[in-house]
Image: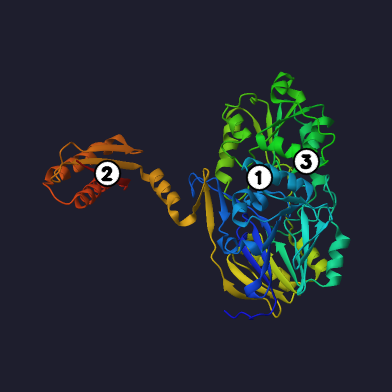
Amino acid sequence: MNHMGSRDELVFLPLGGSGEIGMNFNAYGFGPPSRRKWIVVDCGVLFGREAATPGVDVIMPDIRFLAEQAENVLGIIATHAHEDHIGAIAPLWPQLKCPIYATPFTAILIEGKLEEAGLMGRVRVRQVPLGGSLTLGPFQMDFISITHSILEPNLLAIRTPLGLIAHTGDWKIDPDPMLGEQTDIAAIRKLGDEGVLALVCDSTNALQQGHSGSEANVRTSLTNLIGTLKNRVAVTAFASNVARLDTVAHAARTHGRKVALVGRSMHKIVQAARDSGYLKDFATIDEAEAAELPARKVLYLCTGSQGEPRAALARIARDDHPNVRLGKGDAVIFSSRIIPGNELPIFELHNQLSALGVEVLTELDHFVHVSGHPAREELAQMYAWTRPRIAVPVHGELRHMAEHARLAKSLQVPEALVPSNGQLYRLAPGPAELIDEVPSGRIFLDGRVLVAEGEGLTKTRRAMAHAGLIAITLVLDGKGRVCAEPVVLMEGIPEPVHEAVREAVDEMARKHKKGDAGHLSENIRRAARRAAQDAWGKKPITRVTVVEL
């Protein structure tokens, strides 16, 4: 790979969020390779899935490349407050120890996370006003208001001596977002007039024709739908979509219902929105008070739209929520979409609710949701405004990013670069090109412990979930002879298999006269696994402990 010696370069390094939806982490570097200064845009998580990563709650990017030169990292800038953009700040900040910059609503939510992690006293979170500016070393940034499915999303205009980058974050073009700022089209057009080197842009809906739709239309439709329902109503939505929460409260007021928030993140987001000056007319009652009201007077606003097992709606569906009961004649509206990969838990949730006699209403049968990401006509509009020299699709699976690049080329954008996590690209001077590869990957948050992806814990857990565990203890005397009956413990293995395993272990122990403990341990392990395989068709994880007297 060819570097340019001591000349200044403007480089782009994604460490998460390219080739996947989630875990966004993008770094921009400026200067010669030996003296490069960096800024980080967003620092997010992916959520673990029980089938693929059992026991892992969140997955984060491996940022060791930047951690090793933390003194050159000038700051983390958050475009907005979704978990896939800010969720990794608290766990990863100790590796970078740099200031954090965000607009007020986002800053409040970041501070809450830092406080939970016991870091609040050590970290500087700097609030940038809406439409504000920030200079860090060679990077001068303007925050430009856009629209998305959360308050205060920002497009970052990043100016450097080698060119201007427009980093969109997550966005859509919503002419009537209901809450918060509208898209500052004039400011985005000005960037195009100034000359945009690269547009680094959301690809989530690059395969979808048309527009993503307006929050105002959802307000009309949801209000009408809630008006047709006679008993208790629960609405589940992404808690972070504050405009949607406001819409639900508006619909409730219109039809004489009182709103009760159910679920921790609902309370947290509503408080952050109030603290930032939003939701002034958002009156709520507590769950216990709601339980006393007539059914037609209640609306519950619940977490759990993605079937999360510990969220409020899952508990209600299992009928084990302390304060909320739903039953025959009640209705649940899923004002959300199914995130790919969550189909099974969501459909299971639908079935559990249906078993209680609850009517389940979703975006498949009613207009109750719009996406927060740009469809193709909105992408084309952004390219028309910004007129970049280079299109850099991010925030998408590879198929989304490849299609986004094809769309950009069809719109006469001269260059399109489809990046991969861990690849370092030079954006200027000269044509955009790959110049290096840096250490990258994923880090798992397993309980409270950070572990590298390759440490095999999830592989072992998956194997245990599939075929259980055999644990064998052998006691040997001073001459290496077995001097007590082997102890065999089996977990997650059907009863009929137990006898076959015990017989195989006993027989191998009887055959052993004396000698090498390691050799005996391996023979017994193999015998136990073979017996389980013959009796059951599965090979459990098998562990042997030898105690020598």
Amino acid under disc 3: Ala
Q: Residues within 10 Å of mark 1 (few under 14, many from 20)?
A: many
Residue 210: x percent and y percent?
Answer: 76, 59
Cα distance, mark 1 to mark 2?
43 Å
Q: Which of 318 and 123 is in front in this view?
A: 123
Which element carries disc 1, helix, strand or loop? Answer: helix
- Tag 1 residue: 114
Which element carries disc 2, helix, strand or loop? Answer: strand
Amino acid under disc 1: Leu
Query: Which tag, 1 or 2, sits closer to the chain's start?
Result: 1
- Tag 2 residue: 545
Q: Quick check: can you spot residue 400?
A: no
Query: Which tag, 3 or 2, sits closer to the chain's start?
Result: 3
Using the rendered view, name the quadrant where residue 235 is placed: top right
Residue 525: x percent and y percent?
Answer: 25, 48
Q: Quadrant of the C terminus?
A: top left
Query: Which tag, 3 or 1, sits closer to the chain's start?
Result: 1
Amino acid under disc 2: Thr
Q: Nearer the viewer, residue 538 or 473?
A: 473
Cα distance, mark 3 to mark 1?
18 Å
Using the rendered view, name the quadrant where residue 315 is placed: top right
Residue 186: x percent and y percent?
Answer: 88, 62
Residue name at image x 77 percent, y 61 percent: 156
Task: Please say if the residues under marks 3 and 1 sit with CB atoms less than 8 Å apart.
Answer: no
Q: How crowded is mark 2: few (under 14 residues within 10 Å), some or many (20 or more)?
A: some
Q: Which of marks 3 and 2 is in front?
A: 2
- Tag 3 residue: 273
Task: Please say if the residues under marks 3 and 2 sit with CB atoms less than 8 Å apart.
Answer: no
Q: Quick check: can you spot residue 332?
A: yes
In this view, 199 is above or below 41: below
Cα distance, mark 3 to mark 2?
56 Å
